[in-house]
Image: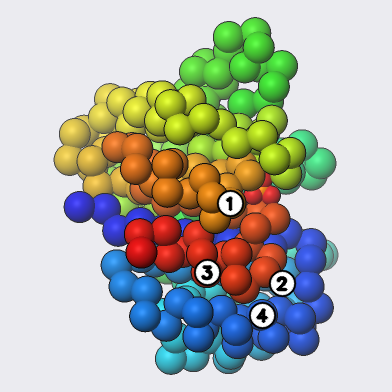
Amino acid sequence: MRTPLIAGNWKLFKTIDEATGMVKELKTLVAATAGVEIVVAPVFTALSRVADSLTGSNIRLAAQDCFWEEEGAYTGEVAPKLLVDAGCSHVIIGHSERRQYFGETDETVNKKAKAAISAGLTAIVCVGETLAEREADRTFTVIETQLKGGLAGFSADQLAKSVIAYEPVWAIGTGKTASDAQAQEVHAFIRSLLVNLFGQSAAEAMRILYGGSVKPDNVKGLMSQNDIDGALVGGASLKADSFAAIANFAS
Ligand code: PGA
């Protein structure tokens, strides 16, 4: 059985005070939530303080990106071991906004994911097609290229420390969620690719999250699909009550 993972990606929102204020509320709302891994991903500058606020709770901490080198003359970058130092257990890698605006490629995703895992982090590797790609019937080709590139050279052990997030770009922040069936179709395709690349049991153990306009009122349907093992939530993760409602999808 795969433990569901509900991750909140706060993107470029919230000051330190806003972030710690929200987790204070969230902690209470999910204190009784069992059998679900809950993760929040604030901006870099809030990580350490949010980590302090999360001490003793069942909520874990993620960064939204990282670099692949441990240290050196790389102005502006943050190394995976510094994320661990700040209290992170997870890191999001290859989000479509990073691919779209910051030149992230499958190759950099692969380098970052490997570096994150060797620092002890769980890498949440994002893939997803644009609307133009879906309309041109290229969804499966795009996902296959991103997945193979992102996980290139992975050992079984590295795979076990990863999570895949399928986020159709056309569904992110648009209010247009993929239907349960549309999402399940791609999730099943991703799992079949993982079977081919890493074998049946490794693929069965992998968590594949759905992201793109996940809300309290559509999470149940998505989570009832065979190959959907969690959610990567943007907008609806910014408020404690809506994010808690998503994390409590099973109750
Ligand atoms: P959204 O964002 O929930 O606001 O669509 C999801 C994401 O970008 O991870």
Q: Does residue 15 appear in this view?
A: yes
Q: CA distance from mark 4 to mark 2?
A: 16 Å
Q: Amino acid at mark 3?
A: Ala
Residue 2 x, y percent position in the rendering: 26, 53
Disc nearer the start of the sequence (1/3): 1
Residue at label 1? 215
Residue occupying image coordinates x 74% and y 39%: 174
Disc nearer the start of the sequence (1/4): 4
Disc nearer the start of the sequence (3/2): 2
Disc nearer the start of the sequence (4/2): 4
Q: Answer left or right for 29 relative to 174.
A: left
Disc nearer the start of the sequence (2/1): 2
Query: Which is nearer the eye, 84 or 209?
Result: 209
Q: CA distance from mark 3 to mark 4?
A: 11 Å
Residue at label 2? 44
**Pointers 4 and 2 in contact (C-beta within 8 Å):** no
The residue lying furthest to the top in this view is: 136
Disc nearer the start of the sequence (3/4): 4
Quarter of the figure with residue 222: top left
- Answer few, some or many: residues within 10 Å of disc 3's Cα (few below 14, many 20 plus, some between 14 and 19): many
Beta carbon at label 1 within 8 Å of ligand 1: yes
Q: CA distance from mark 3 to mark 2?
A: 22 Å
Secondary structure of the residue carrying tag 3 is helix
Residue at label 3? 244
Q: CA distance from mark 1 to mark 4?
A: 18 Å
Residue at label 4? 22
